[in-house]
Image: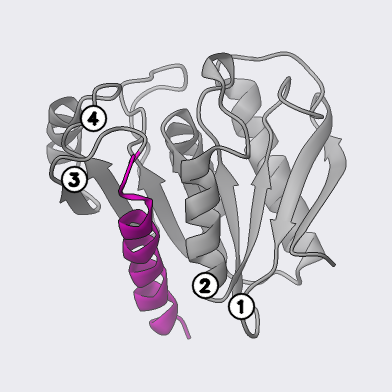
């Protein structure tokens, strides 16, 4: 398998394009990463999604990025969130079958962070990592209850998803996530992708060290 193996799998609305990256060293888990909003140019090649994938690989996980329905070689039409959640769960099922049910990291950026949050409430991952997630998006209701550890990272200078709004939402939760707020960092982490990769990798390594 090459460093980035691209192929399609059967999804709920037709083919889904996936890109698999190999773990550095012996694989200790799988990371499924959701990209930002399809209607605003989001794809599996988004630089933040790619950075999270690299963090996972450097932490010993196989990374699985994918294109939501209607994006790239993925078939179907944009569905406003519900269908995209189904896509994510289909990729999780495929990844678990393909890679021997290894522990799962669910992750996502922006709209993909919102999808990954709802997916995590249904697929029992070992950890959830969200990067500037769209918590105000309500197509599937509010923030679901999670049983897994959740690492949340957001730039305080985000001009797409207001950090102040998400702070209020997180403060209202019975079980808020571990949070890291980066000063002077915008939505797309321009100039701060290395810091993002390092912080996400540290969170993954710490969580995986605690697994049995």
Of mark 4 and mark 1, the one earlier in the sequence is: 1
Q: Position of residue 74 (x, y in %)?
A: 79, 28
Disc 2 designates what residue? 58
In the displayed structure image, the side of residue 167 where residue 93 appears, left or right: right
Residue density around tag 1, few if under 14, some if 14–19, many if 20 or more, within 10 Å: some
Q: Are marks 2 and 1 in contact (CB under 8 Å)?
A: yes
Residue drawn at x 60%, y 79% as measured from the top left: 28
Of mark 2 and mark 1, the one earlier in the sequence is: 1
Of mark 2 and mark 4, the one earlier in the sequence is: 2
Of mark 3 and mark 2, the one earlier in the sequence is: 2
Per the image, label 3 sits on a secondary structure element best described as loop
Indicate which label's residue lies in the foreground, 3 or 4: 4
Per the image, label 2 sits on a secondary structure element best described as helix
Question: Marks 4 and 1, Cα distance to the nearest angstrom?
Answer: 32 Å
Q: Is residue 29 magenta?
A: no
Indicate which label's residue lies in the foreground, 3 or 1: 1
Residue drawn at x 37%, y 51% as measured from the top left: 193
Indicate which label's residue lies in the foreground, 3 or 2: 2
Q: Are marks 4 and 1 in contact (CB under 8 Å)?
A: no
Which quadrant: the N terminus?
bottom right
Residue drawn at x 56%, y 48% as measured from the top left: 33
In the displayed structure image, the side of residue 111 where residue 200 appears, left or right: left
Disc 1 designates what residue? 24
Q: Nearer the viewer, residue 17 or 207?
A: 17
Residue density around tag 2, few if under 14, some if 14–19, many if 20 or more, within 10 Å: many
Outermost residue, front direction? 191
């Amino acid at each position: 398998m090459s460093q980035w193996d691209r192929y399609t799998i059967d999804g709920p609305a037709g083919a889904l394009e996936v890109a698999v990256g190999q773990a550095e060293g012996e694989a200790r888990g799988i990371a499924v990463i959701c990209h930002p909003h399809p209607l605003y140019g989001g794809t599996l090649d988004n630089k933040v999604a790619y950075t999270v994938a690299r963090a996972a690989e450097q932490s010993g996980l196989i990374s699985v990025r994918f294109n939501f329905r209607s994006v790239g070689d993925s078939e179907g039409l944009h569905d406003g969130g519900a269908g995209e959640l189904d896509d994510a769960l289909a990729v999780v099922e495929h990844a678990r079958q393909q890679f021997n049910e290894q522990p799962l990291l669910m992750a996502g950026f922006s709209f993909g962070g919102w999808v990954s949050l709802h997916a995590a409430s249904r697929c029992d991952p070992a950890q959830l990592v969200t990067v500037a997630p769209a918590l105000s998006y309500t197509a599937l209701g509010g923030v679901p209850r999670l049983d897994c550890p959740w690492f949340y990272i957001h730039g305080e200078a985000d001009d797409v998803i207001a950090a102040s709004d998400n702070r209020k939402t997180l403060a209202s939760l019975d079980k808020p996530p571990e949070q890291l707020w980066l000063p002077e960092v915008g939505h797309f982490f321009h100039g701060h992708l290395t810091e993002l990769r390092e912080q996400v990798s540290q969170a993954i390594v710490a969580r995986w060290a605690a697994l049995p």
